[in-house]
Every structure is written in structure tokens, then in C-alpha cells.
Image (cartoon, rainbow, N blue to C red):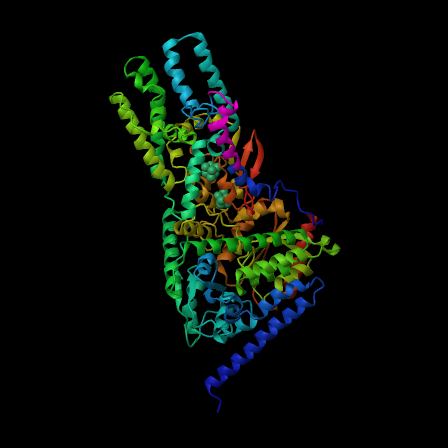
Amino acid sequence: MITTQDRRFRLLQRAAQKCAAESGNLLDTLRGREDYQPEFEYFLDLIKEPTAAATERRSGRTAIRLLCIQAPLELIHAAGFQPFRVFSGSHAASALATQGIPALVCPLLRAVLGEMALDKANLSGHPWILPTTCDWVVKLPEMSALTGLPSLPEFHWMELPRLKNDGNSRKRWMDEIWRLKDFLEKTSRHAVTRTALLASIEAYGRAADAFQKLKTSRASGRLSPVWFLLVGNAFFLDAVENWTEQVNRLEKALFAPRVGQNRHARIFLAGSPLVFPNFKLPFLFEEAGLWVVADDLCSSERLFPGKTFIADTSVFGMLSTLAGRYHQGCLCPIFADNDRRINNILGRRPEADFRGVVFEVLKGCHPYDLESFTLEKGLKAQDLKFIRLETDYSPEDTRNLLTRLEAYRATLEEA
Amino acid sequence: MAMTMTRTRYLSGAESKLQEIRWGFQHLSFLVLIYGGRFGIHLGSAVPCFACPFVPGCGGYCYLMGLQGYIGFGMRTLSTPALWAAFGWMVVFVILVAVFGKAWCGWACPFGLIQDWLSAIRKKLGVRERIVSPAAQKHLTRLRYALLLYLVFTPPLVTAGVLPEDFYLAFCNICPGKALLPLFVGETKYLGLNPDNAVTLGLSFTLLFITGGTLVGMFFKERFFCLLCPFLTLIHLLKPLTALGLVKTPNACTGCGSCAHACPMDIEALEEDRADVQHDTCIQCCQCMKACPSHDALNLDFFGVRIVSSSKGGA
Ligand code: SF4
Ligand code: SF4
């Protein structure tokens, strides 16, 4: 007789196979591309095994699981841990988490729930750091209990103030940073020293420099936006020093732009995070003749808002600078006073020279959804062509999206 | 569509060296203003920073000393050449400030450099910097204006016989520059008490007290003395004439606050949405520009021409 347990086991097994096929297909596609170079192999290898266990093996550090990007990575690194961002773009994993939760959950969080059920990324039983960003993140522990996860990890909450330009909020966030430091010290059983923190800030600064070069290469046509996204996605899967070294190596080895690329129209990409293996949109952009020259995705450019400049090298000084960087400097739409986000796009325009902005919203991702309307108004007023795409991880809307993108490209050419 | 990048004015590499260039310039200025006289260099009596005349063989005189002297002696003698000299140096001072503005504080002042050395030691030791809150800054601004008034009004009172002669150069007598800068040429006499009379004793004691307090303050707070310096106020009063200005492009700012964190003068107004962010305490050190990750958000303009801008790689 087949028990419920057996059925669940089989379901998980099938989902795991589908997940593997999904990422395997994408890796094959990437390897088969005309612009493939052997220097991409390191990043493909990381993506092939995007688990916390593999990351620990590669980096030689215990992984601390994170959601979103507001916990200072430098602090986690200085405490001796490897920051491991839990995110997933797997359609198969997201299809696994359907029962007992609302129908319109953000696909990214749904996929994370699926990954938790599969325990593919070895997610349970280890401490997680959760900043209180969007509603879906806040409700993740509750949803994971509802979907019947056998063992829930320990969650360290960081209460993220939704106001950035307010003195009180900044003080509260600074308290959260100190609490995080205490938590990390208790977990690692050793103190975060000033020299370790300084060294970590420098290591992440070098990573930011390397990424900056890559951004220039993408804008100049030497690096395709698809590969650029892949490199960003791989950032949390190895020690920052290794990743930086490989990015520098790749940047040096990049070929000159291919002639055909000159025919692409240059766009800025904004919106919800794009995560491997959900590369549907980047491929469609290519097909439609659009070249992403700059973006503000938290899975891509926003990983490095620039190099952190430290004026006060005491632990207090460094933590307050980091606190500002990760709170005031964060352009995530969950903030009430995020009106300067548009400046980030307009500020990139002279250097990146784009004519239009593509805003993609993952269905159910309410903060981005809402902010897309505000941005649309502001960007159109600045003579930028704007298109809003709403999608999820399923391949069903591919044709429809492509038609819209081709029409959009035509409007860019008319402009 | 062509895939060429638009030409930018960022001289990458060169611009990220701005702070090294400043550091070098500060040292050069220190050498000229402290030892220049020994090599025949003298920049006159209207230098808009602490070029202390109490340093034997210095390379120029601080205008604060000149100002006190001209107000006091000028009023006393009322002779035409003295008045012309006073007027002439005032014109030179105004021109020097009009051209270089607060850069005198951030790039040339020897006393500013001593403060920067102390900060460098504090940073090496990892000692936390104390932040001066906006409320405390307001009090310090009042104190700066009070010191300027003291500096301007004491000499006439001496001339009028209301105050004793020992109050001549009233500000110099309590200026920590007078106690510390001569030490660099081995002159230690201003570090002792002057027991000639009650006034000299009181003033020399005040000088020692202020110097001690300033040294402690300068160690724990970057450019602590600048917050008290009457030069900062005097140069700020000439702001409408100055060619060198810190200008913000509000719609390039993401509000990240990195500038205010990096600013040695703790100027929070930098984050505000306005073009004129040249605060009265700014010393034009350009640290904010180095910290700002947004292209063009913070800029230094000279006669309306943009000479440096913030960029992702750091100015
Ligand atoms: S505002 Fe900028 S230039 Fe002025 S003192 Fe502060 S950091 Fe220096
Ligand atoms: S550092 Fe630059 S972007 Fe950040 S608040 Fe200051 S001016 Fe704005």
C-alpha cells in the first residue's frame, strides 16, 4: 500500500529530477553559445552546484544563509562565515510549494520554499538571517511551516526600518547591526575584530572594483548581459576572494565585441531579481535585439552599490558606515521614502547611454509592482521609453513576451 | 545603433588619486609655510590659513594676525601708509579667498595637517571617532562667531584704553597654533606660563588649557579645531565671491549617505536635495566626493567649470 509518505517521497524525487534537468539544460545552452569562453567555466561550475554545502566546501567557511541583501556581507565574512544568499529561479521548485499557501505568492519565495522542501541547498537546520523586507519574506517561516517542512531552521531577524531618511530609523538599524554582530559572535564563538572587519571591507571593495570593470565591459558590448547575470548570480557561491580573482581573469580574457552586437538597442533593466535558472528574460532580450547596458536588480548590479569608503576605522566607525550603506543606500522598493531610486537610473544614463527602461515584475512581487508605476511616470517625463513586463517562472508566456519586446525595440528605433 | 560609450569626463585612475594629491599638497604647503622664510620664500601677510608668524623663519603670515594688527595699530597711528598697507593686505586676502575658497583649510593649512596626522594615528590605533551632532554643531558655530567678534573688537578696545596692552593680538594669544606650530622649528617658549603680570599669566594659562583641550579633541574628532576656527567663519562670509564651490546634482544622488559618513566635519546637509551643499563648515577636502558612489552627484566647480566629480570608482 502506498502511504502519504511514499507519495511525498516520490513527488520530491520527481521535483528534484526536474530541477536538475532545468539547470542542466540551461548550462548546456550556455556552454553551446557562440560567445562562450573557457573563463566562464568557473562560474558555470558554481551554478551547477548552488548548494550551501558545496559553497562551504569551496570557500572553507561555514555558510550563513541569507535572504535579501541588507545584512552587511563584510560583517558576516569578518565573523569567519561565508554569506550564502538563498534564492532560486527554479520553476520546478516553485511548482512544488503550492499547498496550504496563497495562490499568488512571489515565485522567488515559492521557489525558495520548494528548495527548502527538497533541502537541495541544505537549508534547514542552519541559522538564517532574515531582514524584514517584503511581506513574503516576513511570512516565509510561517509559510514554510504551512507547507509542512519537517524541520525549520533558526531565524535571526533583522528588523529593517522602512524609512531611510529618518534619524530614528537609522538609530534602530544601527542597533540591528550590533545585534547581528552579537549573533554572529555567539554562533562562531569568537569576536569580530577590527582588523578582520577592515580586511573584509577591503576584500568586498576589490570585488566591487572587479564587478565595476565587468559592468563597463557589458556596456561596451564585450560581455553579453546573459553572462553578466550569471557572474552576479554566482557571487554567493564561493569565497569572495576566489570569485574576485576569477572575475578579473574573465575581464582580461574577454574578446572584442562582435560586429552583430552593434545592431542591438541599449536598455536599462529594472525590477524584481532575476535568478538562475530563470534566464527566460535575458534570452528574450537577446532575441528581440535588446542589450541590457545597466540594471538595478538586487541579483545583479545592486549587489555592489560601489566601493565602501571608510573614514573611521574603529569597529564602531566601520559598522556605522556599513549600516548606512546597507540601509540608506539600499534602493529596494520596500522603503516608504525610495523616491531617489529613479536617480540611480537617470544617473547611469550619460555613461551607459540607453534609450529605454524595461521593468520586469515577478507576479506577486507587490513592492516592485507598485513602484513600477511611479518609475514609469518619472522616466517617461525624461523621454525614456518604458515597458513593464509581468511574468513568472513558467515558460508559457515566452511568445507573448517576445512579441511585446520586439514591438518595444521598434519604438526605441523610432525614438 | 552604435555600441560606443558616451565620452565621460572621468579620468579614471587620476581622479581616484585626488586624496593622495591633497595629502602631498598639504605637506608641501606645511614645508613652505613653516620653513619657507629660511629659503627666502615669504607669501606675505594675508595667508588665509594658520601660517603662524610666531614660527621663526616661517614662509608667510596668517591673515588673522594681520587683521588684528591692522585694526589695532592702524587705528592707533591712522597714518596713510599704515592704512594703505592694511587695505592692500585685505584686498590680497579677499582675492586669495575668492580664488581658492575653503581649499585653504582642506589643502593648505599647516594646523589642519597636524589634525590630519593625529586622525591618521587614531585610525591606525582603531580608536572610534566622536561625532559632533547637528545640535552641538550649532553651538560651535556660535562659538566660532564669538571668537571672530573677540578677534575683531579687542584691538580697538585696547587702542581706546579700555583693555590693557597685553590684549593686543588677542586671538593669537589663545590660539593653539601659536603653541604648537613653533615646536616644528624647536621653539618651545609659547608652551610655558608668562608671569609678567596677571593678564599675561591668565592668557598664557588659557593658551595652555586650550592647546591641551584641542589636542585631545583633535585626536578623538577629525578636524576638531576647524569647528572652532574663526578662519572658517571669515572665509564663509566671503562665500558669494568664491570661485571654488562644492556643487551637488540632486537628481544623481541616491541618498546613500556615504558622503556624510566620510565628511570630517560631519556635514549631514550633504545628503539633502539641493545644489548648493557648500556648508559653512566645509573645508573642501573632497572626502565626500571620494566616498560618493554616484556619477556626478558631488562636484567641485572652479569658476563654473567642473574640475572633479564623484564616480563609482571613487573621486
Ligand atoms: S562637505 Fe565634503 S569637501 Fe566639505 S568638509 Fe565635508 S567631506 Fe570635505
Ligand atoms: S554619497 Fe553621493 S549618492 Fe550618497 S547621499 Fe551623498 S551625494 Fe548622494
Count of all numbered marks drawn on residues in the image: 0
Residue at image position (73%, 56%) is A258
User: Compared with residue A20, is residue A7 higher up or lower down, i.e. above or below?
Assistant: below
| Residue B305, image quadrant | top right
**Left/right of residue B109 with respect to residue B165 in the rendered view:** right
> Magenta residues?
B24-45
Q: Nearer the viewer, residue B228 or A193?
A: A193
Relative vertical location of residue A324 with respect to residue B29 in this rendering, above or below? below
Q: Is residue A392 visible?
A: yes
- Give how far across and how far down residue A173 sits, in percent: 39, 53
Confirm whether the magenta stretch covers residue A307.
Answer: no
Q: Residue furthest bottom?
A: A1
Q: Is residue A279 visible?
A: no
Q: From this viewpoint, which residue is outermost toward the left?
A: B198
The overriding secondary structure of the stretch rendered in magenta is: helix
- Residue depicted at 36% across the width and 10% down the height: B76
Nearer the observer, A387 or B42: B42
Residue A64: % across, % down: 45, 65
| Residue A354: x %, y % from top left | 64, 49
Looking at the image, residue A319 sits to the left or right of residue A402; the answer is: left
Question: What residue occupies the far top of the structure in this picture?
Answer: B79
Q: Residue at x 46, y 87 (%)?
A: A3
The quadrant in which residue A269 appears is bottom right
Q: Residue at x 54, y 35 (%)?
A: B300
Left or right for B167, reference A56: left
Residue B186: x and y in percent read 41, 30
Q: Nearer the viewer, residue B247 or B232?
A: B232
Of all residues, the one furthest to the front in this rendering is B186
Vertical side of A222 occupied by B35: above or below? above
Check if residue B26 falls in the magenta segment.
Answer: yes
